Image (tube, rainbow, N blue to C red):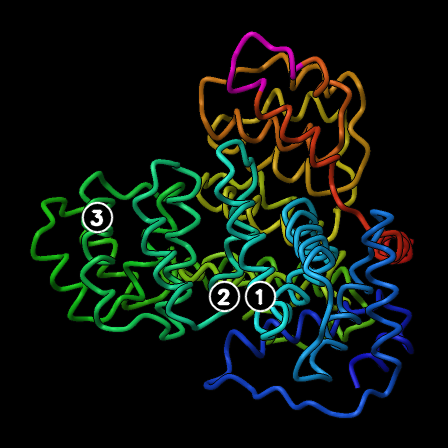
Amino acid sequence: MLDGYEDVLGLTSGLLAATVGGLRRGFQSAEAPRVRKTPEVDADADFDALLEAVAKGVVTGAQWLSASRALWYYDQVFLRHDDWSALASALIRELATSGGIDHVRRFEAAVDFLRHPSSQRHVSRALGNFVMDPDAQVVAPVLNLLGEVTDRAASDLVLRLLSSPSRNLRRAATSVAATKVARGHFDAQALPELERHLERQLSRGLDLDAGLDTLDLAVHVPRTSWEAVESRLRDPVATAMVVRVRSTRELITSRKAASLATEVATAIQDATPTHHPIETDMMLHRLVREALVHTHKARRHHAALLLSASPYGPATADQVLALTHHRDEFIAARAWAMLMRLPCPTPPTGPRQRTVDAMPDRHLARVLINVGIHDRPLDPATAAGLAARLPARRRSEHHGVLFALGMHGSPELERLSEHADDGVRRAAAWWLLQGGATRDDDSAAQRGSRAN
C-alpha cells in the first residue's frame, strides 16, 4: 500500500515505507512477525542486481530495500561467503556515510539483514569490525542497529561498550542502552552494570548537551534501579533534573514545551497552505514537540523523520532553521539537532563560512554535522577555512570539521592526511578510505522537486 502511495505521489522509493517501518518496530507493543510468502517479483533478480551493484560500488537505497524484502521471502538464502561479506561491509559503510532518506532506507534494510538467519552473522561481523576500528570517525549510526535486535549477544556487547576507552563509543553505547531498556531487551542481570554506568556519569554532573544520552538512560531504567543510583548520588542538581524528567518525559518545562511547539507548528502550517491552515493540526503540534524536547532520543528521531517524510517537510526544515537563532541556547541546540533529520532547508543568506565563523562554540559541532549531512556543495574557501581550525581545541568541533570535510570528499583531506597532528592525519586517512558521503540520485531528485 505504501509503495502505491509513493508511486502515485511521485515520492522517493521507500520514503514512506522505510519511515513507517521504523515507527512500527520502535513503538508497537510487540514485534510484528515476519510472514514469508511467495515473491510477487523475482526475488532472485533483486539479489543478482544488488550483488552486481555492490561489485560496481554504486548501490541505491531503493536497491537495498528491495533486496532486504526479497531476503524474507525465504527461510535460507545461500551465497558465497565472500559475497555475503562484501554485501554486509558495503551496507555498513554506506549506513555510516549517508543522511536523510538515504540513511533511513539503508537502516531499514540493515535491520532486515541483521535479523535474517542467513545474513545475521555476516552483518554482525561487519558492524563489529567497523565500530571497533580505532580510527572510525562515525560510529553511532551503525551502533544504533544493536537497538533493533533482542538477542543476548547484542545486549552484552552494548554493556561492554559502556566501559570502552573511546568516548565516542561510550556515548553511542549509552544511547543504544536507553533504547534497549525502553524496549525491554535487558534482563535483570544487566541492571547492576547499567546502574554503575549511570552513577559514574551522573557523579560528574549532568551536562544538558553531551549528557542527554545519560539522561535518556536515567529516565528509562526501572524505578528500583533509579532509586539505587539516586541513593548514592551527591549532586542535588543532577538528581532533581532526573526526577523531574522521569515524571514529565520532556527536556524543558511542560508550559514552555507547549508554547514552543504551538509557535513552530503554527508557522509550519501557515507555510504549507495545501494542508488546511485554518484548522489546527494537532498531530503536527505533537510531532514538533516530541522532535524538539522529548527525553527519549528514539522518539525525537522518529518524530523528526515522520515530519520530514510528510508534506510539511520543507516548511519544517525552514522553521527549525529559524529556531536555531532562538535566544535560549538550549532550544537553539535542539533545533540544530532536529535539523539533521530534515530536508535541506532554504539556503540562509550570506556565505556559509561567515555563518560557521560567527557560530558560538556551543553550537558549532552540530552546525558542522549539518553541513556534512546536507548535500549543498562545500565551496573551496569554506573547506580551507574549516581545515585551518584543526586540530581544534574542543573535541566536538574537531570531529565536526572532519565530518563536514569527509562527507563532502573535500580535497583538503589529502593535505590533512599529511598533517603534523597524528589524530588529524589518521582521521583524514579514514575519510579518504570511505570516499565521502553516500548520496542517492533518486532522493536528490525528490529533494529538487520539493524545493520547486
Q: Mark 2 and 1 residues: CB-CB less than 8 Å, in contact?
A: yes
Extent of the magenta region: 416-425
Residue at 60% x, 22% y: name it: 358
The residue under label 3 is 238
Alpha carbons under labels 3 and 1: distance apart: 27 Å
- Residue 4, given in percent of the width and then of the height, sits at 86, 82
Image: 444 above or below 134: below
Q: Which sits earlier in the primary sequence, circle 3 or circle 1?
A: 3
Q: Quadrant of the N terminus?
A: bottom right
Residue at 77% x, 73% y: name it: 275
| SS assignment at label 1 | helix
Label 3: how many residues lie within 10 Å, few (<14), some (14-19) or many (20+)?
some
* Number of the label disc, if any, that sits on residue 372: none
Alpha carbons under labels 2 and 1: distance apart: 6 Å
Mark 2 is on which residue type? Answer: Arg
Label 1: how many residues lie within 10 Å, few (<14), some (14-19) or many (20+)?
many
Q: Mark 3 and 1 residues: CB-CB less than 8 Å, in contact?
A: no
| SS assignment at label 3 | helix
- Residue 59, given in percent of the width and then of the height, sits at 82, 54
Dividing the picture into quadrants, the one containing residue 179 is: bottom left
The residue under label 2 is 299
